[in-house]
Image (spheres, grey):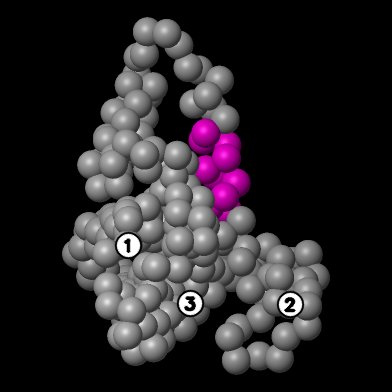
Amino acid sequence: MEHPILFLNLFFEKLGLHVVGPDEAKTFLDFALQPHVTYTWVVMIALVLLGSMVAKRVEMIPAGGQNFFEVVIGGIEEFMIGVTGEHGRFAFPLIATLGFFILVSNYLGMIPGFFSPTANINTTGACAVIVVVFTHVIGIKFHGVHYIKHFMGPIKWLTPLILPIELIGHAARVLSLSIRLFGNIFGEELVLAILFFLAGIYFAPLPMMVLGLFTGFIQAFIFCLLSMMYFAGAMEEAH
């Protein structure tokens, strides 16, 4: 599913470049110009610019926007520490980055002419792979070679049975994180596109857009919460 009109598609086509759909044959250049890639760059550039603007105005006595961002970021950090413990604080930059990226990506598609990168399985899959790989990096960081005990179960003679189950379970985390986020955002994009096409002039999409504000936040929150729980599990001693 694509929006009837995507502003970046039109812009690139004016430049003589071709943005392909999901069912068209792709060259390397076409692949780089797919909507989920181009709008991912939009989200990244927006977040970098916003972060730079906020960082330049940091003062010892916070005021205005600095107060808001300190409350938001501090709240996220305290919530994460409540899940992972104090020793999980080092992973906060990754969690915060993923949270802001996913939230802005979810909301971007609600703007007519824009596309949610998280409505594409490639984007959500990439985020999920980062989380799962970093989970095992954390496990090795905290336990070294003994991290393998997390996969072997509490009883040694059950290891041949438990090991493949644990490996499948950890691999399934990628599917769990990516498909949940992708399915919800893709469904929202599809409904909004249909409503805009059929009844946009009568403001029929507005109730769905209000609901989208809520679901977009919830999906970003769930993704980050599950990531925190995976990190916490990797830091715990094997039982």
Q: Element at badge 1?
A: loop
Residue drawn at x 57%, y 30% is 52
Amino acid type at mark 1: Ala
Residue 149 can be seen in this image: yes
Residue drawn at x 66%, y 90% is 24
Instruction: Tell me the quarter of the image containing the C terminus.
Output: bottom left
Q: Residue 81 carries which label?
A: none
Q: Residues within 10 Å of mark 2 (few under 14, many from 20)?
A: some
Q: Where is residue 137 in the image (x, y as percent from the top left)?
A: 52, 57
Residue with the mark numbered 1:
238
Residues 134 and 39: in front is 134
**Quarter of the rendering containing residue 229:** bottom left
Q: Position of residue 20 (x, y in %)?
A: 66, 81
Marks 1/3: CA–CA distance: 33 Å
Residue with the mark numbered 2:
30
- Does the segment drawn in magenta span residue 47? yes
Amino acid type at mark 2: Asp
Marks 1/2: CA–CA distance: 47 Å
Q: Where is residue 73 in the image (x, y as percent from the top left)?
A: 35, 34
Magenta-tinted stretch: 42-51
Residues 23 and 5: in front is 23
Earlier sequence position, callout 1 versus callout 3: 3
- For this orientation, the residue located farthest to the front is 157
Residue with the mark numbered 3:
121
